[in-house]
Image: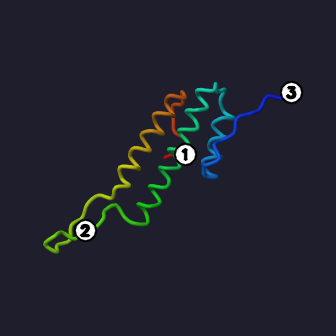
Amino acid sequence: MKPTLPRPPRELSPAAKRLWKTLYDASVMDPQAILLLDLMMQRWDRLQEARAILKREGLQLQEMTAAGCKKFRPHPMLQVERDALASVVRCFRALGYDELPEGIR
């Protein structure tokens, strides 16, 4: 009986699945490393979603104050982007890689 090879999580985007397969094929991974890879690719997708929203909506949101003045504040997706990128980098380093692939930058 042939051993079953792990597959990327179904909820990943097609691009994240390709990157998952590339990283998996380039390494020998134990089950814990595969879990880290899954998490990293989920965060990578979140990073891409945040970047798409920021590109569409801009880095700042405009609000009206009680006095009727315009007020600008940082878009909340900036924090999501920062946190997702930090998580990707931590997972990547925990997997033993030295440089981020071109698709993650």
Would you place residue 4 above or below residue 68 in this image? above
Would you place residue 95 above or below residue 71 in this image? above
Which amino acid type is shown beneath numbered disc 1? Glu
In the rendered picture of this protein, how many numbered marks are placed on residues?
A: 3
- The Cα–Cα distance between marks 2 and 1, rounded to whole angstroms, is 37 Å
Q: Quadrant of residue 53?
A: bottom left
Q: Which residue is mark 1?
A: 102
Q: Residue at x 49, y 55 (%)?
A: 49
Q: Is residue 56 left or right of residue 31?
A: left
Upstream in sequence: badge 2 or badge 1? 2
Q: Which residue is mark 3?
A: 1
Give the SS element for disc 2: strand
**Number of residues whose C-alpha sits closer than 10 Å to that of mark 3, classed few (under 14), some (14–19) or many (20 or more):** few
Q: Quadrant of residue 90?
A: top left
Position in image of residue 8 (x %, y %) = 65, 41
Q: Residue at x 48, y 39 (%)?
A: 88
Q: Residue at x 63, y 43 (%)?
A: 9
Farthest bottom residue in view: 68
Which amino acid type is shown beneath numbered disc 3? Met
Mark seen at residue 56: none
Of the pair 89 and 75, the residue shown nearer to us: 75
Position in image of residue 74 (x %, y %) = 29, 58
Discs 3, 1 touching: Cβ within 8 Å = no
